[in-house]
Image (tube, rainbow, N blue to C red):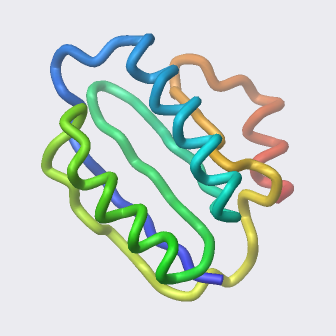
Amino acid sequence: MHELTYTSMADRNIGSKDLNDILKTATEFNKKRSITGCLVYHNGQFVQTLQGEKKTIFDLFEKIKLDSRHSNVNLVWEGPAEKEVFRGWHMAYYSPEKVNTDDVIDFEKN
């Protein structure tokens, strides 16, 4: 299993409908390819970690870089995943404004 994390800047006009579309599409796409991950959105910035087969997540990353809903895509880290952190979450989503303590505790347990 491999993992990569990237950051990017959201388009200024991105709204909740766009975020919902991203999450729906990502969940369906990732499920078919055994990719798991987490997307965090805060103050116009994205941070996303993906886990899966190396080629599969790099192919997805190339596709993500072309998405017009964000820019300044920066690969922060990639390498072998020490453990499967997002098991069962084809695309977990967190917005710091809406995270509750129970979610954080569940995330830390994984």
Which residue appears farthest toward the front when viewing the image? Answer: 32
**For residue 91, above or below residue 18:** below
Residue placed most toward the observer, 101 or 87: 87
Quadrant assignment for the N terminus: bottom right
Picture residue at 72% right of the left edge, 23% below the top: 100
Q: Is 18 left or right of 96, judged from the image as shown?
A: left
Residue placed most toward the observer, 13 or 53: 53
Picture residue at 43% right of the left edge, 12% below the top: 16
**Tally of numbered tags:** 0
**For residue 49, above or below residue 105:** below
Quadrant assignment for the C terminus: bottom right
Q: Is 2 left or right of 55, judged from the image as shown?
A: right
Picture residue at 52% right of the left edge, 27% below the top: 96
Residue 63 in which image quadrant: bottom left
**For residue 31, above or below residue 11:** below
Picture residue at 58% right of the left edge, 48% below the top: 29
**For residue 99, above or below residue 15:** below
**Residue 12 image point, x, y percent:** 16, 20
Residue 62 in which image quadrant: bottom left
Residue placed most toward the observer, 108 or 89: 89
**Residue 3 image point, x, y percent:** 54, 74
Q: Is 4 left or right of 70, judged from the image as shown?
A: right
